[in-house]
Image (spheres, rainbow, N blue to C red):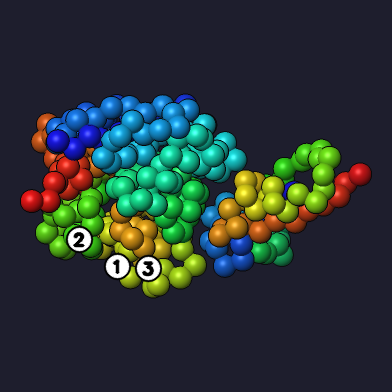
Amino acid sequence: MTRFGVIRFPGSCDEVDALLAARRFGEAELLWHRDRDLKGVDAVVVPGGFSYGDYLRVGAIARFSPVMEAVAEFAADGGPVLGICNGFQVLCEAHLLPGALLPNTSLRFIARQVEIEVVNAATPFTRACEEATQLSIPVKHTTGRYYHPHPDSLADQVVFRYAPGQNPNGSLADIAGVANEAGNVVGLMPHPEHAVDPLVGSADGGKLFESMAWVPA
Amino acid sequence: MLIRPKQGILDPQGQTVERALPALGFDGVSDVRVGRMVELDVEDESRLAEICERLLTNPLIEDYEIVDDR
């Protein structure tokens, strides 16, 4: 059974939802930001929130925490790492993902359900999805405008796009989530961990955790 | 350190300030960009650029300028 490790930074606030979402598909435990080893987990989730108060720039300080050194090594060895919202921002700052996140063009905090399209269903985070399928997942952020100097060069590294007309934050090319070149690190602004039960309107987010827990036959 | 959004990157904060100025009678102001300033005392000036590039800015989206204010 897949063992998930969910990182908790000072200022994280979505780590418990991520933990509970992961436990629907495998085992999961929290990893503290000072941990220098990942306790042998099979997959890492860098959750949402306001790590280190988002001081200076979102994700800028968390990048230098001891646990992130271990995450960088884990990622370099091919381990799957999912960054959600603030976790996406941290992974961009750590250069584990291409690009950067800028303040929403509206300069407002946005919390709403959006449809995102799975553009690449061949990653360890989307293999339980059909290509071009749409997932209903909430966003909640102030700094979610994806930027990359050459977005066309990303090609297959674009994993999720906001459905037409649903881009909530001004992201370039409607990009909602990207992968590294190897495809084992993915970040997205929407929150799959908040959409794992029909009770809250959608269970589509479970597809990402189901994909990560998938043990190839 | 003066830190600015890179040219070509949309700066909605600057745009909002620019739109507000005429309402107060300040006409003829354009290209408003809002950045940040970080003040610090440093013993070894040779490492200032590294400090800027590794922590104070994200070089993908921001430019910086070091101002010696002794």
Mark 2 falls on what kind of element? loop
Badge 2: few (under 14), some or many (20 or more) residues near its Cα, within 10 Å? Answer: some
Quarter of the N terminus of chain A within the rendering = top left
Secondary structure state at the residue bearing disc 3: helix
Query: What chain letter is assigned to the residue under label 2?
Result: A
Please state the horizontal and vertical placement of residue A36, each as a whole percent of the image: 45, 32
Q: A202 left or right of A154?
A: left
Q: Which chain carries label 1?
A: A
Does label 2 or label 1 sit earlier along the sequence?
Answer: 2
Residue A33 in view here: no
Identify the residue shown where x is 31% and y is 47%: A79
Pointer 3 residue: A154
Separation of disc 1 and disc 3 at Cα? 6 Å
| In contact (CB < 8 Å): disc 2 and disc 1 | yes
Residue for point 32% across, 52% down: A78
What residue sits 40% from the left and 33% below the top? A37
Is the C-beta separation of discs 1 and 3 under 8 Å? yes
- Of the numbered discs 3 and 2, the one sitting upstream in the chain is 2
> Residue A170: percent from the left, percent from the top?
41, 58
In this figure, which residue is indicated by the disc labeled 2? A122
Q: Which residue lies furthest to the bottom in this view?
A: A152
Left or right relative to A92: residue A215: left
Position in image of residue A150 (x %, y %): 46, 70
Discs 1 and 3 carry the same chain letter: yes
Q: Can residue A77 be seen in this view?
A: yes
Q: Residue A156 carries which label?
A: 1
Residue shown at 32% from the left, 40% from the top: A44
Marks 3/2 in contact by CB < 8 Å: the verdict is no
Q: On the image, which quarter does residue A55 sit in?
A: top right
Residue count near mark 3 (Cα–Cα under 10 Å), binned few <14, some 14–19, many ≥20: some
**Is B24 situated left or right of A5 in this image?**
right
